[in-house]
Amino acid sequence: MEDDRQGPPGDGAEDLDPHLDLISRLPDELLGTVVSLLPTKDGARTQAVSRRWRPLWRSSMAPLNLIADYHLSEKDSRAALVSRILADHPGPARRFSIQLMFLPESLDEVDGWFRSGTLAGLHQLEATNLCNNHYPLPQHALVRFAPTLRVLSLGGCRFPDLARPPSFPHLKQLILYDVGISEGSLQSVISGCRVLQSVSLHNMGFGRLCIRSPTLRSIGFYAPRTQGVTTFRELVIEDAPCLDRLLPVYPDDGPATIRVIRAPKLQILGFLSEGISTLQFGTTVFQKMFAVSLTTKMYTLKILALDSIGPNLDAVIDFLKCFPCLEKLHVISHPQNAMNNVLKFDPLERIECLELHLKKVVLKNYNADKSPAVDFANFFILNAKVLEEMEIGVLHDGSYRMLCNSLWGKTGLRRWCLT
């Protein structure tokens, strides 16, 4: 920490007191960026470091990073402190994050915050409401911030009912948790974003959601269940030329149908389970994890995660045929499910994935006390010709020595572990 020999900040490092430390000698623009990246309370505390730092937090060179959570203040004083910060800081703002359940009961005050001039040029908006009723996100807030937002994260909110949702020309990440929004509005938002890279839909249900995006790289999703009924019926990837990750988080909860029409760069897929009753890639169709048509192969897929399939070896082999260049396979077993590993395919049949590409297999909830589980693991040990690594999460250690002997005898296997 420097003493009061330091002068006020200048336009560049050459104007500063030579006694300053190396960080303090950085130009105001860089120091302002550092301050803006700190949590709200820590950013404000930099005013006490020295005279050199004192004016930065309240300057336009340090865009406001306002996170109104329990780290900022106690619940009772939080709303007043948010209003004070918005009144004192000149703007612009980098991030505004609020947890509405801890803030004022009157929505008028929150509405006033969204109108504050300090939030001009906002890059990241996070509004979370954990109460039972959806918070109605003000229409003016969405329209105002849309031109500059990079990240939009909403939880427990209701999306404004607009005839035509605003365009988000700079939005890269969209996170929605239990948000009230129509399929048409969400489809319009996603397709209208020019640089969108990631979409996360948590606890969201739709009848049929169609995704078209020239830039989207990742989509993760799970749906709520109402009295055991899946509320997310169908997800269709119509045209996503840059998509490389398709991530059903809790596949047993839906969507019931996933159709991938065009995703030529898809590399990571899963988890998949029997909860997805219909899974389609081009003209290849899986029903309850079994292939009923294998006419389209996806050569781009490298990583696959499967869950809740027993596991059934024939079902897994169907996926290996569909994804011939697969390199990593993750399988979560469920001991309560019966395993059927009596193979129905011709053992002389050449499976490209096993012959040339599969390098790592991860088995979770492996039950070494049951011979079908041992047979399942042994299949990959014996048939994956380029397998380099095998990781097995063992439920019971009673009879895994048989598996250890198989692993020790596997030539080319560089690493294996039992956990």
Image (spheres, rainbow, N blue to C red):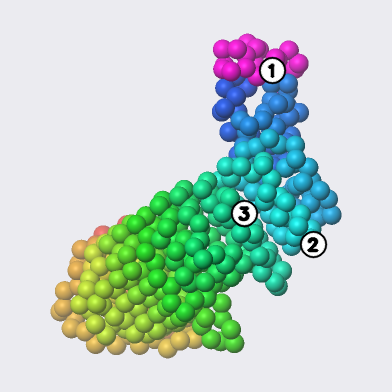
Lower position in the chain sequence, tag 1 or tag 3: 1
x then y, percent, for residue 13: 57, 16
127 or 91: which is nearer to us?
91
Task: Specify whether residue 18 is painted magenta.
Answer: yes
- Residue span colored magenta: 1-22
According to the picture, the residue beneath numbered tag 2 turns out to be: 105
Of badges 1 and 3, nearer the viewer stands 3
Task: Write the residue at 22% across / 71% down.
Answer: 297
Image height of 144 relative to 136, above or below: above
Lower position in the chain sequence, tag 1 or tag 2: 1
Image height of 7 relative to 400, above or below: above
Going by the image, does 255 lie left or right of 128?
left
139 or 74: which is nearer to us?
139
Real-space CA distance between mark 1 and mark 3, rounded to the nearest whole angstrom: 36 Å
Q: Quadrant of the N terminus?
A: top right
x then y, percent, for residue 179: 59, 68
Disc 3 residue crowd, few under 14, some 14–19, many 20+, Cα 10 Å? some
According to the picture, the residue beneath numbered tag 1 turns out to be: 8
253 or 67: which is nearer to us?
67
Task: Write the residue at 73% across / 49% down.
Answer: 71
Task: Write the residue at 65% across / 37% down.
Answer: 91
Task: Write the residue at 68% across / 35% down.
Answer: 90
Disc 1 residue crowd, few under 14, some 14–19, many 20+, Cα 10 Å? some
According to the picture, the residue beneath numbered tag 3 turns out to be: 141
Q: Does any portion of residue 354 appear in the rendered image?
A: no
Q: Amino acid at mark 3?
A: Ala
Disc 1, disc 3: CB below 8 Å?
no
User: Which quarter of the picture shows residue 224?
Assistant: bottom right
